[in-house]
Amino acid sequence: MHGEYKTPGGKLVIVDFDVIDGRLRNIEVSGDFFLYPEEEFEALTNALEGVDADLDDESFAERIRIDLHPDTELLGTSPEGIAIAVRRGLTAAQERGA
């Protein structure tokens, strides 16, 4: 599944993933936003790995906020922006009948 979101006044967020047994798997987050330190990309993907695909956007965003180190900087997007990209991927898949 593939979801994209352009954060207003910010950058593009892309999330690619699978849904297996109702859970997000094989998460890949990319785009033209910045994450400092870059090593936190692993924490970002791990925050969503295995999460119930039926969660609402705020719950996805909260998982990201909890798993990222408090000093991590997301520039050009937010946990909410990433959550919206996930939701768009899920919605697009449902519309295609996947």
Image (cartoon, rainbow, N blue to C red):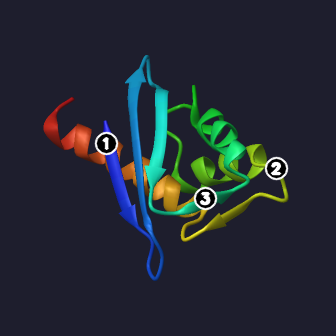
Circles 3 and 1 in contact, beta carbons < 8 Å: no
Residue nearest the observer in this picture, 33 or 17: 33
Residue nearest the observer in this picture, 5 or 35: 35
Q: How much space separates mark 3 and mark 2, taking CA atoms?
A: 13 Å
Number of disc labels: 3
- Indicate whether 19 appears above or below 36: above
What residue is disc 1 on? 2
What residue is disc 2 on? 69
Residue nearest the observer in this picture, 86 or 12: 12
> Which label belongs to residue 79?
3
- Indicate whether 44 appears above or below 26: below
Q: How much space separates mark 3 and mark 1, taking CA atoms?
A: 17 Å
Which amino acid, by three-letter code, is at mark 1? His
| Mark before the other along the chain sequence, 2 or 1 | 1
Which amino acid, by three-letter code, is at mark 2? His
Across and down, in percent, residue 15 comes to 42, 45
Which amino acid, by three-letter code, is at mark 3? Pro
Secondary element at tag 1: strand
Q: Horizontally, is 69 left or right of 11 in the view?
A: right
